[in-house]
């Protein structure tokens, strides 16, 4: 049987995995961008992802998630739309109530600095019930522990956990991280990924670079030419 169809809501290769949702095929918000094969485990009973898990999604800031990410049940992304003003004495959001409160505060509100997009790289695993706060960037290959609160950027191939989330360990040495990001296995043709899935799961950065060079894919392959 071939690889799962990334254009389907649930994996075609395992009909029993109806709790696994390929998010690219469910999300409709213009402020959310999801890469192929990134999935959310809704346990077969939770509300749709963009309604229950992407909070205060009013834009213009976006949530951008790369390919082949695994998002555990109940993971929440808090977008900048939920941020209260902290430039002066009060954090009360007068502007959102309309009327004269809005008229008298809109100009000041729009002048406040805001967080940018929330960006999750490729091949990122975010554990159950973790929360990611506005404007955070989580690098390729990172792991976020269950129930963590991510308040700041997470470096590629770093495991973090806790509240606030702190680095627990770095998965690879800096030169290996650089190699893995140049290999960019998540951008390979799906046939190549399927053929070398075991190497991607359990091999080494050097082995993936070897495969990429042989197939002429990824930045690592270009380095070999």
Image (tube, rainbow, N blue to C red):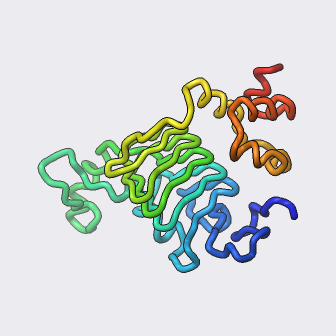
- Residue 60 is situated, as x and y percent measured from the top left of the image, at 47, 52
Quarter that holds the C terminus:
top right
Of 60 and 3, which appears nearest the observer?
3
- Residue 26 is situated, as x and y percent measured from the top left of the image, at 63, 68
Instruction: Spot the residue most to the bottom.
Output: 45
Q: Residue at x 24, y 68 (%)?
A: 99
Instruction: Give left or right: position of 82 versus 173.
Output: left
Q: Residue at x 75, y 42 (%)?
A: 199
Quarter that holds the N terminus:
bottom right
Instruction: Give left or right: position of 140 versus 210.
Output: left
Q: Residue at x 49, y 58 (%)?
A: 127
**Above or below, comparing residue 117 to residue 70 in the picture:** above
- Residue 65 is situated, as x and y percent measured from the top left of the image, at 57, 51
- Residue 158 is situated, as x and y percent measured from the top left of the image, at 49, 39
Tell me the quarter of the picture where residue 43 sits. Answer: bottom right
Q: How many marks?
A: 0
Of 201 and 183, which appears nearest the observer?
201
**Above or below, comparing residue 124 to residue 179 in the picture:** below
Q: Residue at x 74, y 75 (%)?
A: 15
Instruction: Spot the residue most to the left.
Output: 89
């Amino acid at each position: 049987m071939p690889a799962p169809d990334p254009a389907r809501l649930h994996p075609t290769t395992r009909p029993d995995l109806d709790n696994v949702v390929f998010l690219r095929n469910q999300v409709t918000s213009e402020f959310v961008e999801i890469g192929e094969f990134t999935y959310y485990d809704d346990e077969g009973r939770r509300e749709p992802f963009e309604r229950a898990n992407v909070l205060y999604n009013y834009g213009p800031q976006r949530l951008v998630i790369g390919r082949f990410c695994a998002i555990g049940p109940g993971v929440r992304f808090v977008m900048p739309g939920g941020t209260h003003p902290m430039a002066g004495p009060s954090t009360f959001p007068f502007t959102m109530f309309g009327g004269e409160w809005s008229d008298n505060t809109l100009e000041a509100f729009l002048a406040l600095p805001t967080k940018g997009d929330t960006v999750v790289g490729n091949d990122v695993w975010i554990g159950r019930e973790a929360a990611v706060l506005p404007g955070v960037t989580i690098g390729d290959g990172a792991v976020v522990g269950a129930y963590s609160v991510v308040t700041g950027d997470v470096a590629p191939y770093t495991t973090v956990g806790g509240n606030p989330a702190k680095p627990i360990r770095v998965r690879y040495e800096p030169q290996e991280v650089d190699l893995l990001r140049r290999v960019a296995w998540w951008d390979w043709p799906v046939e190549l990924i399927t053929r070398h899935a075991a190497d991607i799961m359990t091999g080494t950065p050097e082995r993936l670079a070897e495969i990429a060079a042989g197939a002429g894919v990824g930045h690592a392959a270009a380095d070999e030419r």
